[in-house]
Amino acid sequence: MTLTHSPILETRLQDWPDEAACEASACVLAARPAIVDAAIELHGPLGAGKTTFVRHLLRSLGVTGRIKSPTYTVMEPYALPGGSTAAHFDFYRFTDPREWLDAGLRDVYAQPGLKLAEWPERAGDLLPLADLAIRIEPGNDETRRVQWQALTARGLTLLP
């Protein structure tokens, strides 16, 4: 079996000293026009801040009301102002990548709209190529080291 990976077109690093920096990065990303149809992977250990970042991003995009973690539901859909949609996925509970297929998520990914996937590695190579991969690594306190990787031309336009 040959292991392949997505080509990385560009990588940028950021340090978030606190949650306010996380929120600021989410606001910058939300202002990018290409965000409405982007596919974004979020990587990092439990407690890294993946869901926190998604909440700030969705708020910055105009989502009102409760923004729930999809850990148990696998997916939470959101309507965005202007008629677009966002889908927040969490594949943490997957034990086999085929669960992604069994859940009918291929159809969801085929639709227009923003896709935000936590724990994408649990869906294996069944997940379509993301535009942007964000890796969040916690420090010894509330700091975070964030790596942004553009995997497509759209991803390049999303980089901070």
Image (spheres, rainbow, N blue to C red):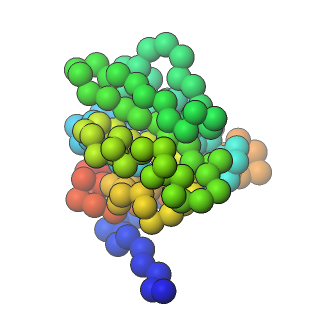
69 and 48: which is toward the camera: 69
The reply to whether residue 67 is visible in this rendering is: yes
Q: Residue at x 77, y 51 (%)?
A: 140
Instruction: Please determine whether, in this image, residue 37 is positioned above or below residue 86.
Output: below
71 and 80: which is toward the camera: 71
Q: Which residue lies furthest to the top in this view?
A: 65
Q: Residue at x 45, y 66 (%)?
A: 125
Q: Quadrant of residue 109?
A: top left
Q: Position of residue 76 (x, y in %)?
A: 49, 30
Q: Where is residue 58 in the image (x, y as percent from the top left)?
A: 43, 28
Q: Which residue is drawn at 41% across and 35% down?
A: 87
Q: Which residue lies furthest to the front in this view?
A: 102
The answer to whether residue 2 is left or right of residue 108 is right
Q: Residue furthest bottom?
A: 1
115 and 32: which is toward the camera: 115
How many numbered dots are placed on residues in this image? 0
The reply to whether residue 19 is visible in this rendering is: no
Q: Position of residue 63 (x, y in %)?
A: 41, 20
The answer to whether residue 101 is left or right of residue 8 is right
Instruction: Please determine whether, in this image, residue 84 is positioned above or below residue 155.
Output: above
Q: Residue at x 45, y 86 (%)?
A: 2
The answer to whether residue 141 is left or right of residue 24 is right
Q: Where is residue 42 in the image (x, y as percent from the top left)?
A: 51, 50
